[in-house]
Amino acid sequence: MAARRGRKKTQRRRSKPKVNLLNAAQTALVANVVTKSLFNANLQEFITGTVNGQYRPGSDGTSVLTIPELAGFTAGGWSASKVGGSYAEGSNALTVMASNAGRNFSPLLMGVIGIPIAFKVAKQLTAKPLINPMNRGLKMVGLTGVKF
């Protein structure tokens, strides 16, 4: 067996990846802009199907789309014939999304492009010397897997 050359490298410990709150907030804001522009419902309404405090998938207006509505749920329960939503004659989910996108194109474009730019600038303005005390405070509280 050949002799080993040089020193044996020591194994480095890897810490678990931390949850970055700024990245999570940016993702949530962009997702909210996209759902508001394409489905005419904010992110919470789109996921839960509760629009204006009432659970009425499919009967909340033609331009409002939610996940329960697209999955075939109605106020009365689930129906296989309602999968994909129910719309006026000659209309479907894609035409409704295209119509919503056309009406909300400017906010969609501003949100999808502007939010990441704003977050990038904010991250540069709040560089490490300012954020280190906040991260130390989070560690003292016990939130070790979270960082700013």
Image (tube, rainbow, N blue to C red):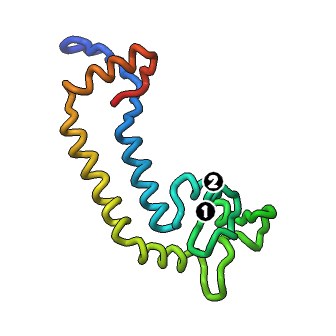
Where residue 141 appears, as percent x and y from the top left, is: 43, 16
Residue at point 29%, 59% (across, down): 113
Alpha-carbon span between mark 1 and mark 2:
7 Å
For the view shown, which residue lies furthest in the right direction?
A: 76
Q: Vertical placement of 25 versus 72: above or below? A: above
Indicate the quadrant where residue 145 lies: top left
Helix, strand or loop at label 2? It is helix
Q: Could you tell me if residue 24 is visible in this image?
A: yes
The answer to whether the residues at label 1 and label 2 have Cβ atoms under 8 Å apart is yes
Q: Earlier in the sequence, mark 1 or mark 2?
A: 2
Question: What is the number of the mark on residue 66?
Answer: 1
Q: Given the image, on which type of amino acid does mark 1 rest?
A: Thr
Q: Vertical placement of 68 versus 95: above or below? A: above
Helix, strand or loop at label 1? It is loop
For the view shown, which residue lies furthest in the bottom direction?
A: 90
Residue at point 42%, 77% (across, down): 102
Residue at the disc numbered 2: 48
Residue at point 52%, 66% (across, down): 39
Q: Along the line of sight, which residue is nearer the eye, 79 or 55? A: 55
Where residue 28 appears, as percent x and y from the top left, is: 44, 48
Q: Residues within 10 Å of mark 2 (few under 14, many from 20)?
A: some
Question: What is the number of the mark on residue 19?
Answer: none
Residue at point 20%, 32% (across, down): 127
Q: Residues within 10 Å of mark 1 (few under 14, many from 20)?
A: many
Indicate the quadrant where residue 121 lies: top left
For the view shown, which residue lies furthest in the front direction?
A: 52
Where residue 142 appears, as percent x and y from the top left, is: 45, 16
Q: Given the image, on which type of amino acid does mark 2 rest?
A: Thr
